[in-house]
Amino acid sequence: MVARETSRPIASLMARVAADLAYLMQTEFRLARSEIGEKVATASSAGGYLAIGAAFALGGLIVLLFDIARWLTVAGISLEWSLLLVAVVSLVVGGLIALVGVNRVKGSALVPRRTLEQVREDYVTVREHVR
C-alpha cells in the first residue's frame, strides 16, 4: 500500500514535467518563428532599396565601361579589342565580388541566434534538474 501512495506523486510529477517540457518546446518554436520572421522582414525591406540602387548603379557602370573602352581606343587599341578587354576585366571583378558575397551569406546571416542560445540554456537547466 505504501508503494501506491508514493507512485502517484511520482507519476503526477512526471506528467507535469512532460507537460512543462512540451510547453517549453512550443514556446521555443514560437520564439524561433518570430525571430526568423523579423530577420526575413528586415532583409526583404532592405532588398527593395538594394534593387533600386543596383539599377541606377548598373546604368552608370555600363556607361563607365563603354567610356573606358573608348579611352583604350583613343590610346591605340582597336575598338573590338578594347571592348573585349573591358568585358573580361569586368567579368573577373564581378565574379570575385559575387564569391565574396556568397561566402558572407553562408556565414549564418539568418540563423536565429537568440533562440539557439535560449534552447542551450533550457537544455542545461533541464539537465541540472534531472540530476
Image (cartoon, rainbow, N blue to C red):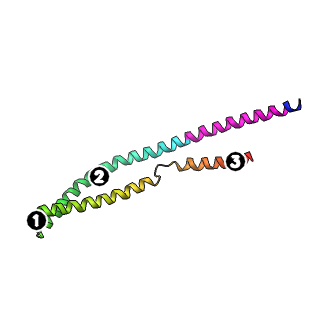
**Residue 69 screen position, x and y as percent:** 16, 63
The residue at which mark 2 appears reads as: 54
> Relative to 49, is 22 above or below?
above
Magenta stretch encompasses residue 41: no
What residue is drawn where x is 47% and y is 42%? Answer: 37
The residue at which mark 3 appears reads as: 127
Magenta segment range?
5-30
> Relative to 74, is 120 above or below?
above
**Residue 59 screen position, x and y as percent:** 22, 53
- Residue 19's quadrant in the figure? top right
Magenta stretch encompasses residue 9: yes
The quarter in which the N terminus is drawn is: top right
What residue is drawn where x is 11% and y is 68%? Answer: 74
**Number of other residues with Cα within 10 Å of mark 1, as a class: few under 14, some 14 to 19, many 20 or more:** few
In this rendered view, identify the residue nearer to me: 46 or 113. 113
> Relative to 51, is 17 above or below?
above
What residue is drawn where x is 79% and y is 35%? Answer: 10
The residue at which mark 1 appears reads as: 78
Precedes in sequence: disc 3 or disc 1: 1
Precedes in sequence: disc 2 or disc 1: 2
The three-letter code of the residue at mark 3 reads Arg
